Image (cartoon, rainbow, N blue to C red):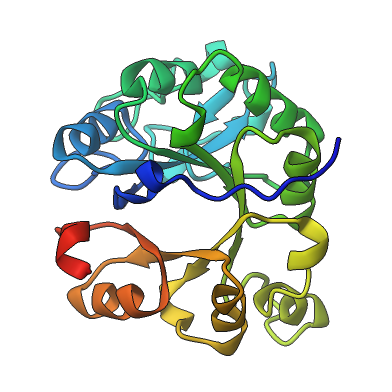
């Protein structure tokens, strides 16, 4: 398949993006209630997906479930039926991607991050594309990952969605390693064919992102959680992924 650059649509970019939904105040991240609140407030939704043992996409940030649920476990080692026995700490169930798609129904953008416990898994990317096949609002969906192979794979297997590369300054434990340098300085960007960049606001501005932005690459800043970071993000990025703040309307930032 010929690889085509695809920008995030104007409609997608007209919404600020709520990080893991609009959570807080007794509402867990990546929960159906957090997603309902984001929709009601007029925000897009960023969420994370893991592949279960029986090849279903569950919506949760961590592979290890104890931080957000009532018992330990590893998402990738459990079937979807076993995951349904888990309860989030606010009493809700762990969502699965089809439930979220049905809830959102094109009303707000969806920014879906592929999470991997260890190595990139082609089956997870394939399942994501399969579950999105019948979702008609293609310009309201974008995909992203920290893993360069995931970005490259998605770009070579679909031209229906913008695919972004997530980055920061501290991606791996050995922060001075050559691989970390290559990742944070966006050296793999060209071979990944990413459509946009999602970069850690704590390390913006920087010359690597600024160079890409000057060349027309769209930039999202994450995770914006203070007024100071929001102001900084609006000077260096095209949109924000936020939590724990009430972001300014897009019109107010122009």
Q: Is residue 33 above or below residue 197?
A: above
Residue 247 in view, yes or no:
no
In this rendering, the answer to whether 119 lies above or below 221 is: above
What residue do we see at 49% from left, 23% from top?
A: 97
Q: Residue 3, relative to residue 89: is it above or below? A: below
The quarter holding residue 231 reads bottom left
In the image, is residue 240 above or below residue 171?
A: above
Q: Provide residue 134's location: percent of width, then percent of height.
A: 55, 13
Residue at horizontal 77%, vertical 75%?
Answer: 187
> Which image quadrant: the C terminus?
bottom left
The N terminus - image quarter: top right
Q: Position of residue 221 (x, y in %)?
A: 42, 67
Q: Position of residue 51 (x, y in %)?
A: 64, 29
Residue 181 visible to an observer of this rendering: yes
At 60% from the left and 37% from the top, the residue drawn is: 161
**Residue 74 is drawn in which quadrant?**
top right
**Residue reaching furthest to the right:** 1
Q: Residue at x 52, y 41 (%)?
A: 142
User: On the rendered structure, is 185 left or right of 16?
Assistant: right
Position of residue 219 measured from the top left corner of the image (x, y, whole percent): 49, 65
């Amino acid at each position: 398949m010929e690889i085509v650059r695809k920008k995030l649509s104007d409609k997608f970019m007209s919404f600020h993006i709520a990080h893991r939904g609009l959570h807080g105040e007794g509402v867990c991240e990546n929960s159906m209630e957090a997603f309902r609140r984001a929709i009601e407030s007029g925000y897009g939704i960023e969420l994370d997906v893991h592949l279960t043992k029986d090849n279903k996409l569950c919506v949760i940030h961590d592979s290890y479930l104890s931080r957000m649920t009532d018992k330990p476990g590893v998402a990738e080692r459990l079937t979807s039926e076993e995951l349904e026995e888990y309860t989030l700490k606010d009493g809700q169930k762990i969502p699965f991607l089809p439930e979220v798609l049905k809830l959102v129904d094109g009303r707000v953008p969806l920014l879906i991050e592929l999470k991997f416990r260890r190595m990139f898994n082609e089956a997870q990317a394939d399942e994501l594309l399969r579950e999105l096949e019948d979702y008609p609002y293609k310009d309201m969906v974008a995909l992203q990952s920290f893993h360069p192979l995931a970005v490259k794979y998605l770009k070579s297997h679909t031209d229906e969605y913008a695919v972004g590369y997530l980055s920061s300054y501290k991606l791996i434990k050995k922060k001075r390693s050559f691989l970390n340098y290559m990742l944070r300085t966006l050296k793999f960007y060209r071979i990944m064919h990413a459509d946009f960049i999602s970069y850690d606001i704590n390390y913006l501005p920087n010359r690597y992102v600024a160079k890409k932005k000057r060349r027309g690459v769209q930039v999202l800043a994450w995770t914006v959680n203070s007024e100071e970071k929001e102001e900084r993000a609006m000077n260096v990025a095209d949109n924000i992924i936020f939590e724990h703040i009430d972001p300014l309307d897009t019109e107010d930032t122009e």
